[in-house]
């Protein structure tokens, strides 16, 4: 379905407005890309579940008119695993943030990837804990300032995509709030992928990361995504995948589909083994 | 009844769950509960159910709650250290009102404690382990057959009250093999599903619960651990939050009569009573019979429901007996509740043990022999 003229408000719970996001936050752009992907695939909203953790990005679950579960901090992949196993026919989307998914919930994220359960996991990566006021995250660049790293972050950050490839995710991509149309295509690819699909979405937090690090407001921060990254092929999906994403240290961060492989999907494997006996 | 068979408590738990309609199990191995997971892993696929071993106990209960929202009856089982990890999601289940059953096969603590040895030291954690005021139901079986029956009942209570229910027994009951006959059919309480075009998942009169739709059934709704209104949407409106808090409390408190079960043995003429649950109650049963043979009129009060605590039974007993001897395998966790319930109207004497050994009939008898004549 062509979603060029789509009014995404049809997927929003207007009674939940106003939302909690700050001016200049990129999360709304990311959500719109996801909703356009859902629309373009003509998914039945009754059959779409969004499972989220805790944090600014996870609050988006409350705003979308699907079956929505705003779970506990970092545990969304585990809740989603139970839901998907109980209702394999549902499209289950996990929304998490970099603190939620990579710090407190890292264990659940890697095991969901290892199982290759059919979920689309969107990790909103703004390099900081926004909701709690700008504390250092496992994605904060070394040297960047945060309220709990006033002299600069002494720790190196995670590369979420390399982590997920290592853990066994069968679709791994990186998208940008700066490139919503490309991000929409990545979401479509992720939703279509029969297995664990992971998208590291770089978004911005002008209020608590930009301000502390003098990176400007929303527009300047989004623009800097363009400078810091390099696309792996235009429009990504069918272009050459970068096998085992290159190390970003010093170099531009790769975006696009970074990894794709075929492995048995967990829910289907369980179901078929149940019917035919285990191999 | 089925043919008599020799069955360990942990297997009876799994069979009870299946009979009650449990079709989802997520767990993490831990002594002395692992046989429950092993039995479920073997039996669930054959009945169309799902078994999954998760990465930890936090994820185990999370997966159960996800499955509960998918419309399944779900269970997990663990022991002390895992039970500690599950507290986060016991709170979520209580707040979001998601039915589930959590089995805690108690071992010695604190921390890693005594992994293979029994205790009854999770009584207060089962009630207050998660933060915030919250409703909970805790059932305490004392025999293999009762593990089966109370596991079935746990699912019934979980559905009826949309709440997490904890089945609490110790390593001895879990590993004990007893000859049991199981009923041909168990009480199966189906999930109350909504009807009609619109659905508010938390719209219920005070002290009651709303039906619970499953994701995918055609109702799009929101579930959160945040304080929420009747539609499930977050709110900080004091009046709405107060109504939610009170309803969560009263849905259990207003139905104490329906929930609370407490066995009384030889209490008609008792001058002294032993209060004990689980395996300690079996030692107590032996102790009171021996005491009777010595001419001491002793009875037994045995809570099958630890939470809500059977205050009414203890309060009534306090008016009739000269003393209550509380025998338990911890340093006085139920003792506090007995003292609270009797409000100083009778003496409360502890008979406690927390060394990894089951409490013995002789110990209880010694307390009775030493103390009872002084009260006569």
Image (tube, coloured by chain):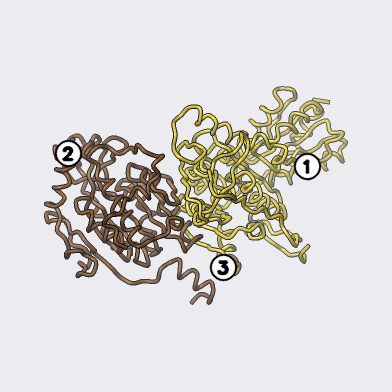
Chain colours: A brown, B yellow
Q: CA distance from mark 3 to mark 2?
A: 54 Å
Q: Position of residue B209 (x, y in %)?
A: 60, 41
Dot 1: element = helix
Which quadrant of the structure image shows residue B278? top right
Q: Which residue is mark 2?
A: A217
Which quadrant of the structure image shows residue B126? top right
Q: Position of residue A145 (x, y in %)?
A: 18, 38
Callout in the foreground (3, 1): 3
- Left or right: B231 in relation to B336: left
Tag 1 and tag 2, C-beta contact below 8 Å: no
Confirm whether circles 1 and 2 share one chain.
no
Dot 2: element = loop
Is there any visible trace of residue A144 in the rendered image? Answer: yes
Mark toward the start of the polypeptide (3 vs 1): 3
- Left or right: A272 in relation to B149: left
Q: Residue sitting at 59 percent across and 63 percent down?
A: B39
Confirm whether circles 3 and 1 share one chain.
yes
- Which quadrant: the N terminus of chain B? bottom right
Residue B287: mark: 1
Q: Front-most of B182 and B69? A: B69
Is there any visible trace of residue B333 in the rendered image? Answer: no
Q: Position of residue B187 (x, y in %)?
A: 71, 54
Residue A105: mark: none
Q: Is residue A238 above or below residue B148?
A: below
Dot 3: element = helix
Q: CA distance from mark 3 to mark 1?
A: 44 Å
Q: CA distance from mark 1 to mark 2?
A: 76 Å
Q: Which residue is mark 3?
A: B45
Q: Front-most of A4 and B297? A: A4
Callout in the foreground (1, 2): 2
Tag 3 and tag 1, C-beta contact below 8 Å: no
Q: Position of residue B315 (x, y in %)?
A: 74, 28
């Amino acid at each position: 379905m062509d979603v060029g003229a789509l009014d995404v408000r049809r997927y929003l719970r207007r009674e939940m407005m106003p939302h909690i996001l700050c001016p200049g936050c990129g999360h709304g752009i990311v959500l719109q890309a996801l909703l356009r992907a859902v629309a373009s695939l003509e998914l039945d909203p009754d059959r779409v579940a969004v499972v989220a953790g805790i944090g600014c990005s996870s609050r988006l679950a409350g705003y979308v008119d699907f079956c929505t579960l705003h779970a506990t901090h970092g545990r969304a992949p585990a809740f989603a695993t139970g839901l998907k196993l109980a209702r394999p026919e549902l499209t289950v989307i996990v929304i998490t943030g970099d603190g939620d998914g990579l710090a407190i919930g890292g264990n659940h994220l890697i095991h969901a990837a290892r199982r290759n359960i059919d979920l689309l996991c969107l990790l909103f990566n703004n390099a900081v804990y926004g909701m709690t006021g700008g504390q250092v995250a496992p994605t904060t660049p070394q040297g960047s300032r945060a309220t709990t790293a006033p002299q600069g972050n002494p720790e190196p950050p995670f590369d979420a995509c390399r982590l997920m490839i290592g853990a066994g995710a069968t679709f791994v991509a990186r998208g940008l709030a700066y490139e919503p149309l490309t991000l929409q295509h990545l979401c479509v690819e992720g939703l279509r992928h029969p297995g664990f699909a992971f998208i590291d979405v770089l978004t911005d937090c002008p209020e608590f990361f930009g301000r502390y690090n003098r990176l400007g407001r929303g527009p300047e921060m989004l623009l800097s995504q363009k400078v810091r990254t390099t696309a792996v092929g235009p429009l990504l999906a069918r272009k050459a995948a970068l096998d085992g994403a290159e190390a970003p240290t010093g170099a531009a961060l790769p975006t696009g589909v970074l990894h794709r492989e075929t492995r048995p999907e967990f829910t289907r494997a369980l179901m078929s083994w149940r019917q035919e006996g285990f191999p | 009844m089925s043919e008599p068979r020799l069955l360990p408590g942990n297997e009876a738990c799994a069979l009870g769950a299946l009979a009650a309609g449990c079709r989802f199990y997520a767990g993490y191995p831990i002594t002395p509960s692992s046989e429950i997971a092993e039995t479920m892993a073997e039996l669930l696929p054959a009945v169309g159910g799902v078994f999954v071993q998760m990465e930890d106990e936090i994820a185990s209960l999370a997966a159960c709650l996800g499955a509960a929202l998918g419309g399944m009856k779900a269970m997990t089982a663990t022991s002390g250290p895992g039970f500690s990890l599950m507290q986060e999601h016991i709170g979520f289940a209580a707040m979001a009102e998601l039915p589930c059953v959590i089995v805690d096969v108690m071992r010695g603590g604190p921390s890693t404690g005594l992994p293979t040895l029994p205790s009854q030291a999770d009584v207060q954690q089962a009630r207050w382990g998660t933060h915030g005021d919250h409703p909970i139901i805790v059932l305490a079986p004392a025999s293999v057959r009762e593990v089966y029956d109370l596991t079935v009942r746990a699912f019934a209570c979980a559905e009826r009250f949309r709440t997490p229910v904890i089945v609490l027994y110790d390593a001895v009951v879990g590993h004990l093999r007893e000859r049991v006959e199981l009923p041909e059919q168990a009480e199966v309480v189906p999930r109350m599903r909504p009807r009609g075009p619109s659905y508010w998942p938390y719209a219920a009169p005070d002290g009651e619960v709303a039906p619970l739709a499953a994701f995918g059934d055609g109702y799009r709704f929101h579930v959160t651990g945040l304080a929420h209104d009747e539609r499930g949407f977050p709110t900080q409106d004091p009046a709405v939050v107060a109504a939610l808090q009170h309803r969560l409390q009263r849905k259990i408190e207003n139905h104490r009569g329906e929930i609370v079960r407490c066995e009384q043995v030889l209490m008609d003429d008792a001058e002294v009573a032993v209060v004990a649950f689980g395996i300690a109650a079996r030692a107590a049963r032996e102790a009171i019979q021996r005491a009777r043979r010595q001419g001491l009129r002793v009875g037994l009060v045995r809570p099958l429901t630890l939470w809500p605590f059977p205050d009414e039974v203890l309060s009534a007993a306090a008016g009739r007996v000269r003393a209550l001897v509380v025998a338990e395998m911890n340093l006085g966790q139920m003792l506090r509740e007995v003292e609270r319930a009797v409000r100083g109207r009778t003496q409360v004497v502890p008979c406690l043990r927390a060394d990894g050994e089951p409490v013995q009939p002789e110990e209880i008898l010694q307390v009775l022999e030493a103390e009872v004549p002084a009260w006569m």
